[in-house]
Amino acid sequence: LLSMMLVFFMHAGFSLLEAGTVRFKNTQNILTKNLFVVCAGFLCWYVFGYAFAFGAVEDPNKFSGGFGFFMNEFWADKSKFRFWLFQGAFCATGA
């Protein structure tokens, strides 16, 4: 979880960097855009990102996975939540 928090706070650093490169009147717009990107990144990761990246099926596809949409059956194995959150932080930071 510490690693996830460090990766997630990279986005805060990117926001400060972008806020420092624009005029004062545009700072609020940049920070709002960055907040929207983080929210959209995690939402897309929740809906289909994890399933495409790590959703192994019995008959694998060379392009993407097909299991785990909307965190399907995550309650069976609680250790998946940490992995999902860590990878989601990378998804949101890279978006």
Image (cartoon, helix red, strand yellow):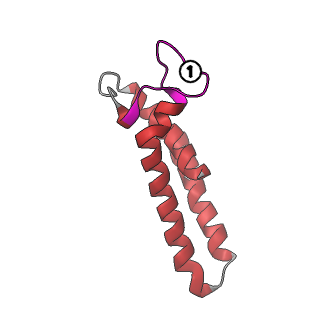
User: Image point 60% across, 54% down: which residue?
Assistant: 10
User: Which residue reaches farthest left?
Assistant: 75
Using residue 42 as the reference point, say whether residue 12 is left or right of it. Answer: right
User: Looking at the picture, does residue 13 appear above or below residue 77?
Assistant: below
Q: Residue at x 48, y 64 (%)?
A: 35
Disc 1 element: loop
Determine whether, in the image, residue 86 is placed left or right of residue 21.
left
Q: Report if residue 1 is visible in the image.
A: no
Q: Is residue 30 magenta?
A: no
Residue placed under numbered mark 1 in the picture: 61
Residue 68 on the magenta span:
yes
As drawn, 18 above or below 2: below
Choose between 19 and 1: the one closer to the eye.
19
Foreground: 1 or 29?
Answer: 29
Q: Position of residue 4 (x, y in %)?
A: 52, 42
Q: Quadrant of residue 11?
A: bottom right
Residue 65 in the image: state x and y as whole percent: 51, 26
Residue 55, percent from left and from top: 48, 25
Q: Is residue 22 visible?
A: yes
38 or 5: nearer the eye?
A: 38
Rendered view: 22 above or below 39: below
Q: Amino acid at mark 1?
A: Asn
Question: What residue is shown at x 34% (from left), y 28% (from top)?
Answer: 74
Determine crowd level at label 1: few under 14, some 14-19, many 20+ residues with C-alpha closer than 10 A: few
Q: Residue at coordinates 65% horizontally, 70% vertically from top-left? A: 18
The residue range painted magenta reads: 53-69
